[in-house]
């Protein structure tokens, strides 16, 4: 025992001796306004990043850093934690060409999308139920530099031919026709260690059958037995209520058909851990800031998206405005009641850019910029059980965005990105941009 201890001490001594000879790996970031928890700005901040982590934090001149560590002057800048997007659909769209189809899902595509998220300051994302094969699990297990971390629900569940939007996504989803189907699917997903189980409870405007309460009760029960959470795509208030009674863990959308009522609020209050990812639709005014989108999406695709909005009839614009308004009222009501609000975009082609549009839309809905930043960082990291993300604090992973202006003054300032750091390394935004829109 004594010999062993001496051996350990010698090894420790050896480590510290060699460490003194090499230059310090730590970097001091100082002078920025720091919005460490998404809430309040601290003037003249300083924090030390070493080996991918934040090792200490305080005010300029007061933080302990190894002698010789380089200092990065962030005077005039604002630092916020990197964003966390809990609802995306990645790997399908070939964004460079605008093509999407049955044959387009690839690992390269998925990684391209994770790079795009990183470019726009997103540190991690949760893919929501249309991930085929082994690729999503491979990518989850092997994080890529300059790319967001990836979580997956694998294959989600709906009634046969009634799941996700595109026809070629339907075979990816499990077709659930009995409680036994549901339990079997959950068992398969548990073997894959999915991050959560996704279900679609929606009749798509009366065109397809919905997962029935007995079916989703069996799915939720089986998932909970395997220590898995279930997150539901919903549309109707009545389904949201029934899902709460059945033990649902989170909603991938807000209620969209009508204003939420007291009964719903009571059910939410009884289940304080249930989270809502608002996933707001467009506000009716069209594409926000298409010039910024052009940094990552080719001109033809930006034009197609812009035209889609511009060519709408006045009736369609009115419909879109009303559709936003009901969801905005519902979000404000939930937020005012202290419900756990997450952050997600449901995005494909405009992945990453959409995150900033969503931040703005949530403020338009009536949340404060501070509340929205907290939802998109701290709360979403908690929802995804990514303890190392969501705040800028000692011991956390060094994932943060350097902005040219303060988003607490105006939420669109999140678009003024100077730099993004993920896991302690500056993301090569210029290099990525060349691959997004270059030849
Ligand atoms: Zn979705």
Image: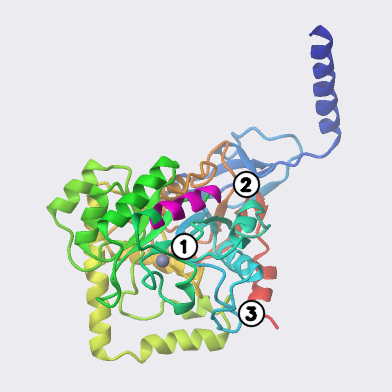
Q: How many other residues sit within 10 Å of disc 2, few (<14), some (14-19) or many (≥20)? A: many
Q: Count up the numbered dots.
A: 3
186 drawn magenta? yes
The residue at the point 40 percent across, 87 percent down is 308
Which image quarter: residue 287?
Answer: bottom left
Q: Residue furthest left?
A: 262
Tag 1 residue: 129
Gap in angstroms between the C-alphas marked 3 and 2: 31 Å
Query: Which residue is nearer to you in this view: 236 or 56?
Result: 236
Q: Earlier in the sequence, mark 2 or mark 1?
A: 2
Tag 3 residue: 437
Please give the label number shown on residue 29. 2
- One can see residue 378 in this view: yes
Q: Earlier in the sequence, mark 3 or mark 2?
A: 2
84 drawn magenta? no
In which quadrant of the rendered image does the C terminus lie? bottom right
């Amino acid at each position: 025992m004594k010999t062993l201890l001496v051996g350990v001490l010698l090894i420790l001594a050896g480590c510290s001796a060699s460490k003194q000879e090499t230059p310090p790996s730590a970097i001091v970031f100082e002078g920025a306004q720091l919005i460490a928890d998404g809430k309040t700005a601290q003037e003249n901040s300083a924090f030390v990043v070493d080996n991918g982590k934040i090792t200490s934090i305080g005010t300029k001149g007061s933080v302990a850093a190894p002698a010789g560590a380089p200092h990065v002057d962030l005077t005039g800048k604002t630092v916020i934690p990197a964003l966390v997007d809990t609802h995306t659909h990645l790997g399908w769209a070939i964004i460079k060409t605008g093509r999407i189809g049955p044959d387009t899902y690839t690992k390269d595509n998925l990684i391209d999308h994770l790079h795009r998220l990183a470019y726009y300051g997103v540190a991690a994302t949760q893919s929501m139920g249309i991930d085929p094969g082994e690729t999503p699990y491979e990518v989850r297990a092997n994080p890529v530099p300059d790319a967001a971390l990836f979580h997956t629900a694998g294959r989600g569940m709906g009634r046969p031919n009634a799941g996700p939007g595109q026809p070629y996504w339907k075979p990816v989803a499990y077709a659930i026709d009995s409680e036994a189907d549901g339990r079997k699917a959950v068992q398969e997903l548990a073997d894959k260690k999915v991050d959560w189980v996704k279900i679609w409870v929606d009749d798509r405007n009366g065109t397809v059958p919905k997962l029935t309460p007995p079916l989703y009760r069996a799915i939720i029960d089986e998932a909970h037995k395997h220590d898995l959470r279930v997150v539901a795509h919903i549309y109707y208030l009545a389904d949201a209520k029934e899902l709460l009674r059945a033990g649902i863990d989170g909603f991938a959308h807000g209620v969209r058909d009508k204003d939420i009522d007291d009964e719903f609020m009571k059910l939410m209050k009884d289940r304080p851990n249930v989270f809502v990812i608002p996933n707001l639709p467009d506000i009716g005014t069209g594409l926000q800031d298409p010039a910024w989108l052009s940094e990552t999406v080719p001109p033809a695709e930006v034009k197609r998206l812009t035209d889609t909005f511009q060519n709408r009839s006045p009736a369609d614009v009115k419909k879109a405005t009303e559709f936003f308004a009901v969801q905005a009222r519902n979000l404000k009501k939930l937020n005012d009641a202290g419900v756990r609000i997450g952050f997600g975009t449901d995005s494909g082609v405009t992945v990453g850019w959409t995150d900033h549009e969503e931040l703005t839309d949530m403020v338009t809905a009536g949340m404060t910029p501070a509340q929205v930043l907290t939802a998109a960082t701290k709360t979403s990291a908690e929802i995804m059980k990514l303890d190392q993300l969501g705040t800028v604090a000692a011991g956390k992973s060094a994932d943060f965005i350097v902005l040219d202006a303060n988003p607490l003054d105006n939420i669109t300032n999140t678009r003024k990105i100077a730099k993004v750091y993920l896991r302690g390394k500056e993301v090569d935004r210029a290099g990525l941009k060349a691959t997004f829109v270059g030849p």
